[in-house]
Amino acid sequence: MRMSDKILRGLALNGNVRVLVAKTTDIVSHAQKIHGTYPAASAALGRVMSVASVMGSMLKDEREKLVIDIRSDGELNHIMVNADNRGFVRGLVSNPHTHKVNEANGKLDVGGVIGNGTLSVSQEFEGNTIFNSQVALQTGEIGEDFAFYFAQSEQIPSAVSVGVLVNEDLTIKSAGVILVQVLPSATDADIDVIEDVFSKLKPVSTLMIDASAEEVFNGLFEDIELLQETPIEYFCGCNRTQMEGALRTLDNKDLEEMIREDKGAELECHYCHSKYPFSEADLNKIITDRQNQS
């Protein structure tokens, strides 16, 4: 029986190092089913969702939301993921039927399908952006890109191992992430230990095939201490009220055109593909409400 997805957060090396480990097989599997992603797209989206889950767990307030936005010039030119500190994660990709294998090593070529571009990280509080930072993609392989982001934007030296294994039938075999961050109190000796641990570490996607998040977490450092455990779930949270709000941003002319040509409208959520139909009466009510307010 497969263990449920979760994030483990703790300290190691006399409290000088922050450690986060997440098993994300189930949420990446859910995203693959929703979007019908091919292997390279599954790996790209799954890696971003995995890192986003641990970053979201570090938010202070439940009303905050982390938004990761990758835009690039490759075939897979847009990835967007949202996460919060409750363990809710959702994501989308621009071209789910993207697939490429690196001929040199036989592995999925995530960097090749993403290409050159930018990685943006934002924090939103009740819909308002309170923090935003952007860095250039370094390799497009995601792990290296987030390590660069942490060093440049947050001034926190970090080691990131993130991976997704895809079965031949396109389903997800395993997924997970290990994030180790150096705190200000860390010594050069602590950094040497981290480098040694990561030099001997198997790919995290391999580790997560049979091991639980707890087993991976406890095996990293001798003095590791667990501080927090958070279950992870692919959760969209879209609803009809949000979709109606989107319609209310349109001009009356656009709404009248929908009524005339389509006899209504149907909006689809890009994160979960739920569909929300709106009748002629619904659209007319939006127009009437606006006229009554003017």
Image (cartoon, helix red, strand yellow):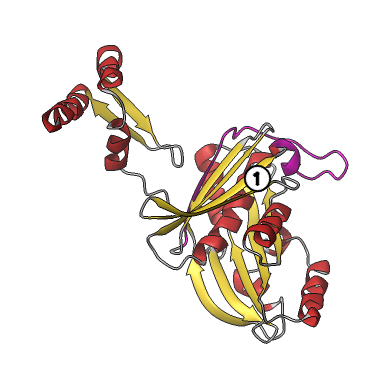
Amino acid at circle 1: Ala
Residue 239 visible from this viewpoint: yes
The reply, left or right, for residue 25 in relation to residue 278 is right
Residue 169 visible from this viewpoint: no
The reply, left or right, for residue 20 in relation to residue 197 is left
In percent of width and height, residue 293 lies at 14, 33
Residue occupying image coordinates x 14% and y 26%: 291
In percent of width and height, residue 278 lies at 26, 28
* Most frequent secondary structure within the magenta stretch: loop
**284 over 100 or under it: above or below:** above
Numbered range of the magenta stretch = 87-113
In percent of width and height, residue 98 lies at 66, 33
- For mark 1, does the 10 Å Cα neighbourhood hold few (<14), some (14 to 19), or many (20 or more) residues? many
Q: Quadrant of residue 279?
A: top left
Please say whether residue 90 is one of the residues in the magenta stretch: yes
In percent of width and height, residue 134 lies at 61, 49
Please say whether residue 58 is one of the residues in the magenta stretch: no
